[in-house]
Image (cartoon, rainbow, N blue to C red):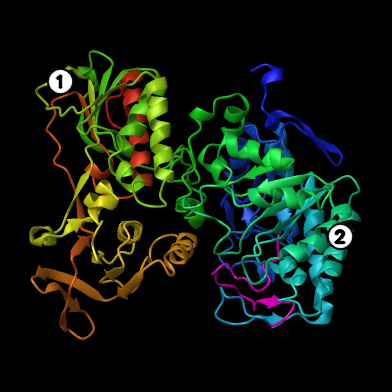
Amino acid sequence: MTASHLPPAAAPLTIGSLTLRNRLVATAHASGFVRDGLPLSGDAEYWGRLAAGGAALLICGGTTVAAESAPRQGNILQLHRPEAVEPLRARVDAIHAEGAVAVCQLVHLGRETLGAQSYYAPAAPSAVRSPREPTAPRALLGGEIDQVVEAFRVSSAHALEAGFDGIELHAAHGYLLEQFLSPRTNPRRDGLEVLERVIAAIRGLSTTALLGVRFSVDASEDVAPRPDELAELLPAVDPLVDYVNVTVGVRTTYVRDMATERPPVLADLARLRSLITRPLVASHAFRTAAAIGDALAAGADLVGMARALIADPDLPRKVLTGRETAVRPCVACNEDCRTFDPVLLCVVNPDLAPPGEPRRPAAPLVRAWDPPRVTGRRVAVVGGGPAGLECALSLARAGVAEVVLFEAADRLGGQLSTAAQAPHRAGWAALLGFYERTLSAEGVDVRLRRSVEPGGELAAFDAVVLATGAVETSPLTEAGAMVSSAALARGVPSLAGADHVLVADDGFGWWPGCDVVELAVAAGVPRITFVTPGTAFAGAIPPESRVQLLRRLSGACELDIMPLCTATGIGPEGVALAHHTSGRITTVPADQVVVVGERRPRATPDCANPLVLTVGDAVVPRRVAHAIAEGREAAVRIAAALRHGMTTPTP
């Protein structure tokens, strides 16, 4: 693109003593490559790769300033420790090598424990219990506030010694500095004074280092500042810092899931802009060029993203050069990126991997592997679900084969398409759209409504990847129940007109049962009964998603939850339920029953082709992350065999 046609986000910005190359920021998150509070091998590589994607400013998060604020598993960087400086310098060097500015965000959690075990008691400005904690913290003694200020100063000194260009103070998400600032958690009202002392201590270390502060601005929780409080706070802090970063929420709500389709700070930017003179960073749920443009037009100077860059670190370069359609989208599923098991991973990005691995580990099922029999370079992918889509795209990008994708249905997606039909789950549709666009751009021959057999069209291919997916089954369908995938595929019409829908979960508490409940709400069903052999409703979905789901359901219908019960049959009187604790059998009348059944792999054909691999649910039904990783791995192995005549599959 010519300079005259560059988007506003491409403009450089001088902030403090530094000039940023554009207006896009990687906001604070952690790589997970941390053990015993110190960076591991792989941490610097992660941040270097992120910087190479084009973001101008990288704010490194997951960094505590005191031992009492660090979970005992040691997976959060502990910057109060001097031994963190040397390994952290490698991270900074990797960021600088790619032309980005490096800032370290510092946090003290105060009364919030992140749900993790700690060796120490939580402490806060006062003994006001967090709604996210079972007990109240102890109140900090007067002299301990001096220790908090010193903890921020020492950690800032270590960050600057490691080479960071600046510090961001975390005064959002209900953590300690926000607890000081809120009159609901600090009756002494000395929060601004404490923040000013912390800022002065850091300024005393360097007059040129950047200094920013992050605030939650939605006032939706017990601790976040309200509009009138922000109107006093922001003008007071503005002259003391180099930038202000605004976000939303507390621990259970600050990572919004795919039900949030518009960045929540957009509506507040004009008001916030009028309160400060310093550069304003707008953060949270920005994923598209349109939303970035809206934020800049509304008064933001910089736009921050985290999960979107985890899904595709090249998003800045793609957006700034007019290639947004090539961005691998964050779907906001809040699964792997929130667990750090064992490190930061991403459902849609198979390139993120644990230490020592070139990509997310995966093992396609090898059905045949005889490279000497390969005579050409044609690959058939059978099935257009997430495993088949990723395999076909990766093969096409490898440039070593003609790729044909066969799909028996009239559209691509498989279970991805079904999941996207659920209310508030449109993130999956964004991922499906990405695959459809990029497959076309890469020249993949997509053939819909085509069922293939080994002795037919498949015989002409050197390699076959079977991504035929799974089917959902349940004995209750013989008595008139619908399986969840069928209900979701049909959408609202599948439940329209019902007065009472019973949802029989499988007990594992994942999304299918929750999605059917929301589908029933969307269909206007007045009464819903949710039956599960498990102990809870939505017990296995990501915690932030569960909080947001329960808020959506509050008051939406009459929803009865019946745990520790199994639906055993359907008769004229209703659904028979076996109660696990009492052993009783009761009957619940319902005019529609939807059951979360068991998913079983579809039968795959016995192919005589030289290279045959099975991937995704056709191996064992699991999550989207497994399907994408196995699709990528199958493509890598086949491409290597076609290039090099490999004689055995990679172990």
User: Mark 2: few, some, or many residues within 10 Å (few <14, many ≥20)?
Assistant: some
- Find the magenta span and give its range: 106-127
Which residue sits at x=69%, y=83%? 127
Q: Which residue is mark 2?
A: 236
Q: Residue 159 location, x and y as percent?
A: 77, 51
Q: Which residue is mark 1?
A: 457
- Horizontal relation, residue 108 to residue 32: left or right: right
Observer-nearest of 427 and 70: 427
Q: Residue furthest top?
A: 375
Q: Quadrant of residue 362?
A: top left
- Whether the magenta-drawn stretch holds residue 126 is answered as yes
Q: Residue 464 location, x and y as percent?
A: 22, 27
Mark 1–mark 2 distance (CA, rounded to whole Å): 72 Å
- The nearer-to-camera label among 1 and 2 is 2
Q: Is residue 236 above or below residue 529?
A: above
**Amino acid at the residue labelled 1:** Glu
**Amino acid at the residue labelled 2:** Ala
Which residue sits at x=75%, y=75%? 183
Describe the element under mark 2 as helix, strand or loop: helix
